[in-house]
Amino acid sequence: MYYTILVNANIGEYMESCYTKNHIEIREKLSKSKEYISSVEKVSTIFSLLGEPNRMKIILALMEGELCVYHICEITGGKQSATSQHLRKLKDNHVVKCRKEANQVLYSIADEHIYSIVKTALLHKDCK
């Protein structure tokens, strides 16, 4: 898609000229799509959750394997109460899952999609 932006220096107006055939159709389709709006909200929530540094520490630890809260706290340096709150938010949004074993609750990554998102971000961090 190629865009040309022309600036009228006298009044500072922008005129945008688009050289695609279907930009109006795309705009109409997406601006009225409830599915599109819902997807934007859900994906934004996931990135917001993953964007918090303490939660990312938890995710990176869980990518190594299933852990209890105690060991997550040891690895991440977080306090138990704060770590539990982060885990609850991650669990409520299907980023992590948990299971009980005896008197412990063990946490793990919810599915391969989360692995994929984080692995892609880790690869991208070194791009220039």
Image: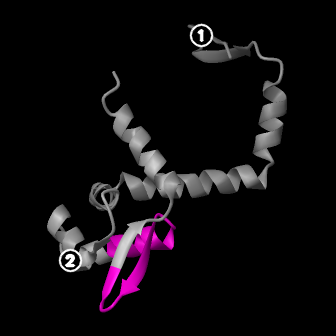
Q: Quadrant of residue 18?
A: top right
Return the x and y of residue 96 as percentages of the image width and height. Answer: 44, 67
Return the x and y of residue 119 as percentages of the image width and height. Answer: 40, 43
Three-letter amino acid code of the residue under disc 2? Tyr
Who's the residue at 24% across and 80% down the image? 81
Magenta extent = 85-105
Earlier sequence position, callout 2 versus callout 1? 1
Pick the residue in front: 21 or 57: 57
**Tag 2 residue:** 70
Pick the residue in front: 55 or 24: 55
Of circles 2 and 1, the one toward us is 2
Q: Which mark is residue 7?
A: 1
Q: Is residue 90 magenta?
A: yes
- Tag 2–tag 1 contact (CB < 8 Å): no
Q: Which mark is residue 34?
A: none
Is 43 situated left or right of 24 in this image? left
Q: Is residue 122 above or below residue 43?
A: above
Helix, strand or loop status at disc 1:
strand
- The quadrant in which the C terminus is found is top left
- The quadrant in which the N terminus is found is top right
Is 12 situated left or right of 28 in this image? left
Who's the residue at 39% across and 67% down the image? 108
Helix, strand or loop status at disc 2:
helix
| Label 2 Cα crowd, 10 Å radius (few <14 / some 14-19 / many 20+) | some
Three-letter amino acid code of the residue under disc 1? Val
Return the x and y of residue 67 as percentages of the image width and height. Answer: 29, 71
| Label 1 Cα crowd, 10 Å radius (few <14 / some 14-19 / many 20+) | few
Is 28 situated left or right of 10 in this image? right
**Marks 2/1: CA–CA distance:** 59 Å
Q: Is residue 107 magenta?
A: no
